Amino acid sequence: MFDTILIANRGEIACRVMKTAQVMGLRCVAVYSDADAGAMHVAMADAAVHIGGPAPADSYLRGDAIIAAALASGAQAIHPGYGFLSENPEFVEAVEAAGLTFIGPSASAIRKMGLKDAAKALMEKAGVPVVPGYHGERQEPDFLAGEADQIGYPVLIKAVAGGGGKGMRLVERPEDFAEALKSAQSEARTAFGNPAVLIEKYVTKPRHIEVQVFGDGTRAVHLFERDCSLQRRHQKVIEEAPAPGMTEEMRQAMGAAAVRAAEAIGYSGAGTIEFIVDGSDGLRPDGFWFMEMNTRLQVEHPVTEAITGVDLVEWQLRVAAGEPLPVRQEDLSITGHAFEARLYAEDVPKGFLPATGRLTHLAFPESARADTGVRAGDEISPWYDPMISKVITHGPTRAIALKRLARALEETQVAGTVTNLAFLGALARHEGFAAGDVDTGLIARDIDALTDTPEVPAPVIAQAALVALGLDGKPAWDQGFHLWAPAWRTVTLDWTGEARDLRVMVRGPGSALVDVDGLVVEALWQDGWQLDGTAAAPAARSGDTITIFAHHGISIRVIDPLARDAAAGAGAGVIEAPMPGLVRAVLAKPGQQVTAGDRLAVLEAMKMEHALTAARDGVVAEVLVTEGQQVEAGAPLIRLEDEAEAAA
Ligand code: ADP
Ligand code: ADP
Ligand code: MG
């Protein structure tokens, strides 16, 4: 076994790998960018090496700097985590050329699975069912359109070099094919430097079911399946294991196909074979097809660990150190059911817009496994994935594991940035999901209900008023404004986007009334505040923001009445970059008339594209950026003026 390893990653996965490695007695070396000098993975490591600037290309993607750090710190092996260099065969070769061990598959295995078309051809040969379609070399539009006709609509166009749902287009009708092909190819060219596509039959009521495999270079075993059908824009949101409705017959067929796939390429280490499953008529052994293989540890690996009791990182380290597979297939079995929810800093109603910010408060319940790479006080920076944590629960049955997930999400406390916590909570309580009726369209179909923000209850607002006045702690006898002459006092809060005045009267220690828009809430102290009879939720205040940890976190701003009017009147005339990023497209032209909601530019940041739209009607006065330009957060991109101004 190694005595020192370097982890070529950051955040949650770097911490996850170190956790196991340190328990095994290994010394762990972290690498970090300028943006991560104070990050959790650096604090956790036994040693840390600075490798460059905050942009991934200047640090976490710099194979040479990482290998130099490993050699300088006495590491014998490099764990790549996921993302970044984890599926880069040239990096694997460079690691090995430096005399180090890559904790993962061989460069040749990664290469064989690197492009979706070649991987499909290879899998077909190995007897693994693949999605019907065209995955040959020809790329002429007319030829591909002909293939699409033969496959039968709907079809899916996929970038052969694709990943993260990019370069993919669903085409429902032949007349839309040419246009979709063009846009898929151009997206693939910019994102992957390779415009080649393949055409696939679009499976109806698709379910994404993947199989965890583990190989030692010759032999492989599978650790059952995970269902990752709860997706938004082809990206996973909640994963579970095993798959609901799975039959023993189909599990065996999928497991055997996955092992065949791994053994066909001499796979070593942890990998995932992703299948698309036709869920329109229940699960059947002939209704699954190979989509792609991810040649690394997957984000959602903890659900497999929860149901098998295997520590996949421990296995990765042991197999990389030359040990054979720790178990035989027949030694593996499933215990209970597990879920994982991905908690992100993102604004779900705004189209899952990634957010940034300093986490002023962060706490997870003891009852769930929380894999995180941040602590309270840390920043979700614009440079990387905005993941805050993964919340994982396990239970003897699916229903119990899901209830535990819903409860764990209710007890998770985050303040300082917008998150998808309420959305995850709504999913965990979704009836169809609870019934196991999942497919990849579920989120898009029910997005309105899942993002419905209920009105903030008056007791929560009343509690915030107490916090705002510093009255939330244990009351003292000298507390109150006029102990012997109760009087109303005003506090201004904003919980709807609009400042509202509330009135608070302290009647004596431990007794107050809060008037919320005419609704009077009674606050009584009984070993803690009770608001109209319900116990106050935990709360945190940071600057002028109060977060009440009820209903997945309600953020309320305290308004200084003097500052209130100064802010009013600022027009939405300038469209600014909401985060640092690359200007992908400029759609607005000077002099153009636009209406509120029109797309003006497209910004790429945090692995996603964001359309920037006009906040109001007007005329484009100035376009301040060009395509391909890198911009800072807050940079002015486009200036609008009113029609009257434009005419003058
Ligand atoms: P999965 O299929 O397991 O959901 P993806 O292939 O979509 O994973 O992405 C792999 C992971 O790479 C992401 O979930 C993310 O955490 C990590 N990552 C984070 N930042 C970056 C980055 N800037 N570039 C590449 N990968 C990143
Ligand atoms: P990526 O490399 O971007 O992860 P995948 O090939 O794994 O691309 O596909 C991503 C997602 O797109 C899948 O999880 C699934 O939701 C959907 N998808 C892919 N292929 C099909 C198909 N043939 N029919 C229906 N949905 C599909
Ligand atoms: Mg995939």
Image (cartoon, rainbow, N blue to C red):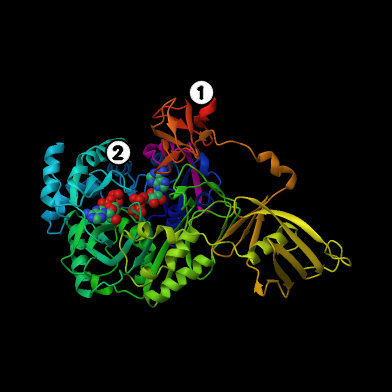
Q: Amino acid at mark 2?
A: Glu
Give the quadrant of the N terminus: bottom left
Q: Which residue is mark 1?
A: 647
Q: Outermost residue, right direction?
A: 484
**Mark 2, secondary structure of its residue:** helix
Q: Residues within 10 Å of mark 1 (few under 14, many from 20)?
A: few
Q: Which mark is residue 187?
A: 2
Residue stretch rendered in magenta on the structure: 44-65
- Residue 406 picture location, percent across and down: 47, 69
For label 1, the SS is helix
Percent from the top left, x then y, of residue 286?
A: 15, 66
Dividing the picture into quadrants, the one containing residue 20 is bottom left
Q: Is residue 594 depicted above or below 234 in this figure?
A: above
- Left or right: residue 342 compared with residue 555: left
Residue 602 x/y as whole percent: 40, 37
| Cβ of mark 2 under 8 A from ligand 2 | no
Viewport quadrant of the C terminus: top right
Residue 81 shows in the view = no
- Labels 1 and 2 touching (C-beta < 8 A): no
> Within the magenta stretch, is there residue 274?
no
Kind of residue sitting beneath label 1:
Ala
